[in-house]
Image (cartoon, rainbow, N blue to C red):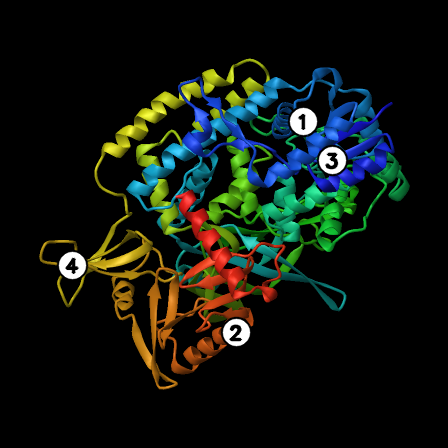
Amino acid sequence: MGVNLVIVESPAKAKTIERILGKDFFVKSSFGHIRDLSKKNFGIDIKNRFEPEYIIPEDKKKIVADLKKSKEKAEFVWLASDEDREGEAIAWHLYEVLGLQENNTRRIVFHEITKEAIQKAVQQPRQINRNLVQAQQARRVLDRLVGFELSPVLWKKVKPALSAGRVQSVAVRLVVEKEREIQDFKSSSQFRISGTFYYMQGQNEVVFQGEYSKKLKKPDEILALFNILKNAHFKISDLVKKPIKRSPAPPFTTSTLQQEASRKLGFSVAHSMSVAQKLYESGKITYMRTDSVNLSSLATNASKKVITQEYGAQYHQFRTYKTKAKGAQEAHEAIRPTYMDQKSIEGTSAEKRLYELIWKRTIASQMSQAEIEKTTATISISNDPGVFTASGEIITFDGFLKVYSESKDEESENGSKSLLPRLTVGQDLKYQALTAREKYTQIPYRFSEASLVRKMEELGIGRPSTYAPTISTIQQRGYVLKENVPGIQKKVHLIEMKDGTVIQEQLTDTLGNEKGKLIPTDIGMVVNDYLMEHFSEIVDFNFTASVEKEFDEIADGKRHWVDMIDGFYHPFHEKIEKSLEVKGKTTGERLLGTDPNSGEDVLAKVGRYGPVVQIGRTREDFKPKFASLLKNQRIDTITLEEALDLFKLPREIGLFEDKEMVAGIGRYGPYLRHDGKFYSIKGGTDPMLIDTEEAQRIILDQRQANEKKVIKTLGDHDEIKILDGKWGPYIAYKKKNYKIPRKMDPSKLTLEDCLKLMTEGDKKKSDKK
């Protein structure tokens, strides 16, 4: 057959495929994209029909050179990048850069890395799909135009060093609007009344619970009701038994896998995709970027065999599923194990857990419905028109529930259904206790990473390949934080009656207590507000979804990508130019009140280095004072009192080693200053409350950590330091840092070596400028 070169995207995949194909094939990796748009002049020739200018980045030149050498030895080149728009574009870039020819180039695709799938792909090669390439190119060009034109506007109008992205800005809008919904929410309370009832069965009490049909708002109303109920007779007036059938959830798509892995395993969206990628590349699951819920006949037949062997024929039910996602594309299979008879795998703990989740979900999707008997009992009251209702469920046939049950987000949690004892109509009951607990209406839930993905999918924003990068990007840019929210403490009434005696208590409930939720930063909110006011179409949900449809049309060959970009760019560019003509900045300014000492306005806003409070406005005769907000403070919620407290910083704490310790807040957050050196205050410690003992501990701990970082000191006064940093060893001199090449041993560097590296580093920075 001759020498065959197969090029894939990742080295992990290369090893697996080379093992499958055998000695006539050698497999190389491109390590993802080998070309990208140039940073110079957007990398797009706007006047020449948006012609992209592609370059090979420095870190990819060695890879390209190696691939070119390998190509020269090969009779046939097989481009085996992933079967989606991104993968098709990678194949096209390889074709162009390596100077491949159609007569000896083959494009192959597969959804799973198995012997059968890869051999089938080799037997059915095709040409590169130029429509898919153009759809990906359109996305890349459009996103570059939006980002490179809009970001400088944000620098000028909001704050330096900001950036904007088409899909990311919409994701930020969703998080901001959710936060504003929470801020505007007015929680009200009402009493939830439950009764604990019983009847005698021989010598034993059979106990169950029911809920009163009316909700009351005031303690007086509860006391009046309990006064009536203490002399009431209770009996079962109605009993309804209803059979229910529940069906399993469909197999996983990218977004449902991300959601369920978040709920069941606590994985972030990015972590789920990273682990899934490893499972795919090692041949354990099918391709992990898909919005299809289809299963191949091979998978359904293999599932049937596993189900009948493991659980019995009565547990199997053949099912097909249809994709409901808005604007679904890329007709892959759903995410499933490549071999359905492999219930577990070898690998890391995360890989094992995610694989087990995928296996269970796939198997359950081909299993019988669960059969449940739901019972609802109505308890009448002899002297009151209200009723108590008790309900319970009995699983008569577990079906798919034997293997897997889908989790729910907080919004759709109804609690588990308990079982009811044997009841009959007309049966007399007695109450053991009647309880009324005050409940506040639930504050709307913030987005988790997974629920934000679900919302984006519902709106048709983004695609399976873009969800994880989008959510990572908005956090990296500082527009959104992933945090735990402590919630608000509320006093609630508890009124209970036992044997005619009423007891009242006051308890504390926490409202809005959430873990790992997405919260917009002040910068995120101000940027969102600016875009909403001046570039509303960029953050419009329908516009963003319609752009995705246009990419789909390009992929289907129904539209030319240049026409699509042209229709968007010119009106957008006009808006950019007009916005730059408007004077003034957007700072999200909020008036908090008046400073009692100076009589000047106290404001909260976004400053050059982040959120600040300000006393007074700039005038010829007055220079305002500024103070940075603490980490847990926000422009839209900080009070006048909290703002004025910030001006008490920097504050003197006490002496240490005969030098004053001072606490303050700077550009990079809370700090301690001592003997001309600065020490970060971490862990959310309030610089207003820090005491002498804690300040000394922080200084000593950081000194110790800094000493461990020092590999070597050089120079006449030890002013050149070789330090071990987060990203590896580096040279520090006069508040400047210089890289040390990996091939050099930092412990063996001489003064001469360091001076040479510093000179080269300064030259590179100068050339870059």
Quadrant of the image for the C terminus? Answer: top left
Does residue 402 lie above or below 96 as drawn? below
Give 704 or 348, whichever is nearer the viewer: 704
Q: Nearer the viewer, mark 3 or mark 4?
A: 3
Residue 259 at x, y percent in the picture: 61, 44
- The local secondary structure at tag 1 comes to loop
Q: Earlier in the sequence, mark 1 or mark 4?
A: 1
Q: Are marks 3 and 2 in contact (CB under 8 Å)?
A: no
Mark 4 and mark 2: span between their CA atoms? 41 Å
Q: Nearer the viewer, residue 567 or 52?
A: 52
Q: Residue furthest front?
A: 752
Q: Which mark is residue 707?
A: 2
Q: Is residue 343 left or right of residue 650?
A: right
Provide residue 492's location: percent of width, then percent of height: 44, 64
Q: Is 530 located above or below residue 394 in the figure?
A: above
Can the viewer see residue 620?
yes
Whether label 1 touches label 3, CB < 8 Å = no
Residue at left offset 39%, top offset 23%: 569
* Helix, strand or loop for disc 3: strand
Sequence-first disc among 2 and 1: 1
Q: Which mark is residue 259?
A: none
Residue at the far right in the pictured view: 309
Residue 515 or residue 162, whichever sits in front: 162
* Residue tagged 3: 28
How far from the left and from the top, in percent, is residue 465? 59, 35
What's the CA distance linking mark 3 and mark 4? Answer: 64 Å
Between disc 3 and disc 4, whose residue precedes?
3
The disc, 4 or 2, on the residue closer to the chain's N-terminal end is 4
Q: Which residue is mark 1?
A: 322
